[in-house]
Image (cartoon, helix red, strand yellow):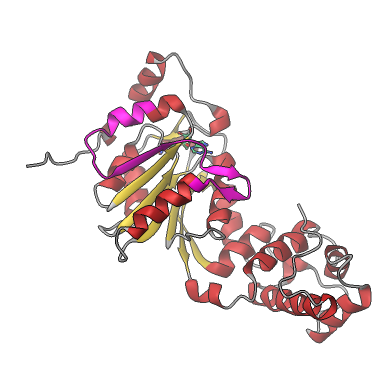
Amino acid sequence: MTTPKKPKQNRQTISYLSQRFEEVGLNPNKRHGQNFLIDLNLIQLLARSAGVGPNDVVLEIGTGMGSLTGMLAEDAAVVITVEIDEYLHQMASEELEDFDNILMLKQDALKNKNRMHENVTNAVKQQLAEDESRVFKIAANLPYNVATPIISNFLRSEVVPATMTVTIQKELADRLVATPGSKDYGALSVWVQSLCDVSIVRIMSPKVFWPRPKVDSAIIHIVHRPERRAAFGDLDFFYAFVRAMFFHRRKFMRSVAVSAFKGQLTKPQVDEVLEQLSIGADARTEQLTMDELQTLCEAFRQQVIKVTGEEKPVMANQGG
Ligand code: SAM
């Protein structure tokens, strides 16, 4: 008979964490966003909000000491957890040694800011291939410095998660749920909401972390909508288009579009697209809804195809 698996989540307290760090003569590393969630109720809320079930392959980025990892592994088919810090990886391995459904990777989860590391995506693909009923989900208290690329890249990856339930900076959560015309509305809001439903589960004050970050945080729940993805002519083009169009958010959209398509479309060819959609010369990108941006993007893409003859055009100037 196998011993029942029990995570050691009661150990995620300030005294336990600081003692473990002292033992190895280290301090939490700010550069790696090492702010540990020390409120057990909130760790449970995050795990519960992820809605993990027995068919799920769950990816956690930032194992830390493994307290959320253990909780997720109680319900998931398998948990793949990635940690960049060698010492934390080692400490978490000890904490999680009783589990046989946790796969631990010691490395940077990102290949670069535009791509997840292939070891991570390959591990997910391999686990999904074990059984066709398996579903891919992400649940994590994300390192804040890489939260944006992780969320954004996974929506362009070969394996797209059905849901992402993650802790991030509140300021980033505000951008993810922002609506047209608001100050937080930008390329990231459009990119994520065009493909997903996004909701804020809980706002959290700095005091539920050790060490305390300077800002508030939030747990967010992102649900991927494959039917929205299917409506895009070319998702990579849309990604580049949205980034380029929000790069100078204060400028009139016409002049942003002229410089974004410089070398591909002439000014009259840009104007032709805007006139076709009855978009005035004084319109700004931040006023357009997601649907309007999608329609505009497709109209520009068709114009580039018509003018250049390329079948799969790439945007000339992709913003920052
Ligand atoms: N899961 C733990 C918890 O909930 O308390 C730790 C979360 S802490 C906010 C983020 C963790 O991600 C840290 O352990 C940090 O070392 C790790 N990390 C930071 N950057 C990373 C990266 N690029 N790839 C993988 N892990 C990373």
Residue 113 inside the magenta-drawn segment: yes
Q: Quadrant location of residue 194?
A: bottom right
Residue at 21%, 35% in the rendered image: 98
Camera-side residue of 6 and 131: 131
Percent of width and height locating residue 61? 45, 43
The correct choice, above or below, for 246 with respect to 42 in the image is: below
- Tell me if residue 7 can be seen: yes
The correct choice, above or below, for 13 with respect to 147 in the image is: above
- Tell me if residue 138 can be seen: no
Image side of residue 144 versus residue 98, left or right: right
Residue 101 inside the magenta-drawn segment: yes
The residue at the far left in this view is 1
Percent of width and height locating residue 164? 45, 56
Image side of residue 44 versus residue 61, left or right: left
Percent of width and height locating residue 255? 88, 66
The correct choice, above or below, for 31 with respect to 140 in the image is: above
Residue numbers of the magenta segment:
90-118
Residue at 73%, 70% in the rendered image: 287
